[in-house]
Every structure is written in structure tokens, then in C-alpha cells.
Amino acid sequence: MREDQISLQLYTVREETSRDMPDTLRRISEIGYPAVEFAGYGGLSPQDLRKVLDDLDLSASGAHVPLDSWQNDPETVIEDMHALNCAHAILPIAPSEHHADEATVARFAESLNRWGELCRQWGVTFSYHNHAFEFAPMGGTTMWDVLVRETGPELVHLELDLYWVRYGGADPETLLRDLADRVSLVHMKDMASDEQRSDLPVGEGTMPWPTLLSAADAAGVEWYVAEQDNPRDALEDVRISLRSMRELASG
């Protein structure tokens, strides 16, 4: 991981972006992040957001785009990515109706392949972002195994959330090694040692970062994205994560 590969998933500061996206981006830039990953556009058009990013010398490392946008108007999703100069469009979650059983997941994978092919035609990389439920038993398999099996490696890449992989009972280092050609991005948040295994800023928990980053580097990961689902103090937590990630990058 290099410092210029570090990004922030803006879901972490969602309360701030909902109030004032441009000012939040300014604060993130001042903290020192070189890039951000969007989770909504805060009421701005992608064209207006691009102007804000350019003024702040921020890059768009990726954007989480909800399922209904892919289902209803994937062409506009791609236009938005081009407007943001954003190479990675990510489906952030599969709603529960799409992982009821193996057949349902296989049908869902067909949609992922279709959107991945469309993105590929227009120079955008399509990725799926995991949580923990993908690793739960499902008959004799898991949703994760079905998705990996039924999606084309050249069409559907993976944004591997290392915390949620571990939370779900899988080994993130093994997945990084086995799926190296498909993992374009990783999400980084730390795991507390409490019973709930709460999420924490990078560097404050039990995730084995040197080992994981070595595997991610070997896999050719493009972006290392800090994220917390439940920050304590969002702007302070992202500051802590950036400091820790810089230390890891220089180590």
C-alpha cells in the first residue's frame, strides 16, 4: 500500500455529507486523504461534484451505487462515473431477497455479469462489496462461493471488506491470495476484541494489517479504502485511520 492509494468511504461521514457535501469533502482533504469513495452524492450532480473534487485536488477512487440504479438505469450510472472521472463502480450490498438460496444467488450473479459487461464496454470496473452474510452456510455452500463461481472474473471484480470477511468466519488473507486477479479494492476497518467485535479506526483493533496488506499488495489491489459503519466521532476516527494507514504504508 502506497499513500497515494489510500481513500475514504464517505459512508463513514454520512451525517456530515448529508448536511454539506462540499464542506465535508474540504475537511477530508484537509485531514489529508488523497481520494474518496462515494456513497451517494449529497444532492449534487456528478458534474458539480467533479468541480469540487478538482478544486480540492481529490480523486474519486470509486462509488457505491445502489441496486435500484443498476436495475433501472445502468447507462446513467456509467455516465456518472465518467463525469466523476471514477474508474470503479461498486454494488454495495445484495438485498436479502437475492440470497435466499443457491438458485436465487445464481440468478443474481447473471445480473452482476450483465452490469459488469456493460461497465467493461465503457471503461469502468464493476465490483461487488461484501458483508458477513455472504459467508454464512447456505445448504451445502455459501452465497460467496456461488457468486465467485457464477460471475465472470473479467466482468465482476470484488471490493473485499476485510473486516466483514473475518467477521463472517472466513480468512481475508486466503481470499486475497485465491482471488488475486479479481480484488481491485479493499475496505479497511479494525475489529475490537469485545464480544460484539465492533468496528474501530484502523490501528485500534485486532486485524493483522501487515499480513493482510502484504497479501493485498501481492494481489495488485488498486485502492485501500478506510471505512467505519459505526464511527464514534466520524471526523476524528477517519483522522486516526489515515494516520495508521500512512504508518503502515511507510513500514
Image: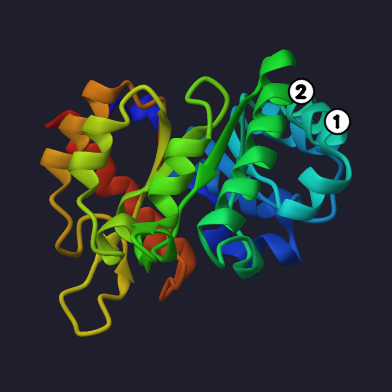
Residue at x 28% of width, y 47% of height? 243
What's under tag 1, amino acid-wise? Glu
Q: Nearer the viewer, mark 1 or mark 2?
A: 1
For the residue pair 32 and 228, the one nearer the viewer reads as 228
Image quarter of residue 215: top left
Q: Give the percent coordinates (x, y) of residue 197.
A: 25, 75
Up/down of 46 relative to 137, above or below: above
Instruction: Tell me: 71 left or right of 138.
Output: right
Residue at the disc numbered 2: 82
For the residue pair 172 and 27, the one nearer the viewer reads as 172
Q: Give the percent coordinates (x, y) of residue 155.
A: 57, 24
Instruction: Tell me: 103 left or right of 225.
Output: right
Residue at the disc numbered 1: 75
**Would residue 93 be seen by someone viewing this image from the given angle?**
no
Q: In the rendered structure, which disc, 1 or 2, sits on the residue that comes first in sequence?
A: 1
Label 2: which secondary element: helix
Q: Quadrant of the C terminus?
A: top left
Q: Quadrant of the N terminus?
A: top left
**Total count of labels:** 2
Label placed on residue 45: none
Residue at x 76% of width, y 23% of height? 82
Crowd class of label 1 (few under 14; some 14 to 19; many from 20; radius 10 Å): some
Up/down of 97 relative to 212, above or below: below
Q: Give the percent coordinates (x, y) of residue 56.
A: 63, 33
